[in-house]
Amino acid sequence: MTQPAKLIVVMAFDRSDNGDLIPAFEAVQFDSEERALRSGKNLAGQHIGVLAWAREAQPDIGEYGPPTVLFQSGEVPEME
């Protein structure tokens, strides 16, 4: 059995004209938690909220583990 891959993602959020939290750009995938953490910290001063997270993933069979927050700053939506 192969080891599950890890999905490592950074997202940033801004506010829309009506005040809702919206993604500032498409989620960005990273190949290491360290790089995602560095990116998240760099984005923190530029957006309302930043979230870096990771989860084990087996996309070929559509299975994903629970998300683990690596870095969070400001206002971000609830993770599902």
Image (cartoon, rainbow, N blue to C red):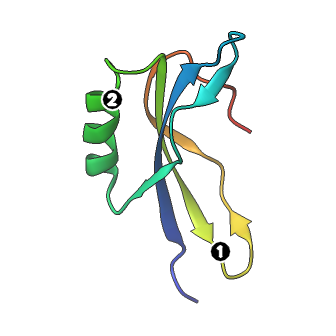
- Residue 41 sits in which quadrant? top left
Instruction: Name the amino acid, label 2.
Output: Leu
- For the C terminus, the quadrant is top right
Q: Between label 1 and label 2, give the one nearer the viewer.
A: 2
Q: How far apart are marks 1 and 2 (CA)?
A: 27 Å
Q: In the image shown, does 59 or 2 lie closer to the viewer?
A: 59
Measured along the vertical axis of the image, is residue 5 above or below residue 60? above
The residue singled out by tag 1 in the image is 59
What percent of the width, then of the height, locates residue 20?
A: 70, 16
Question: Which numbered disc flags the more N-terminal residue, 1 or 2?
Answer: 2
What percent of the width, then of the height, locates residue 71?
A: 41, 31
Residue drawn at (68%, 62%) of the image: 64
Q: Is mark 2 on a helix, strand or loop?
A: helix
Measured along the vertical axis of the image, is residue 55 above or below residue 76? below
Residue drawn at (58%, 22%) of the image: 76
The circle drawn on residue 43 is 2
Q: What element carries label 1?
A: loop
What percent of the width, then of the height, locates residue 78?
A: 69, 27
Horizontal side, residue 67 vs residue 8: left or right? right
Residue drawn at (54%, 74%) of the image: 4
The extreme bottom residue here reads 1
Horizontal side, residue 71 vs residue 27: left or right? left
Instruction: Name the amino acid, label 1.
Output: Pro
What percent of the width, then of the height, locates residue 29?
A: 44, 57
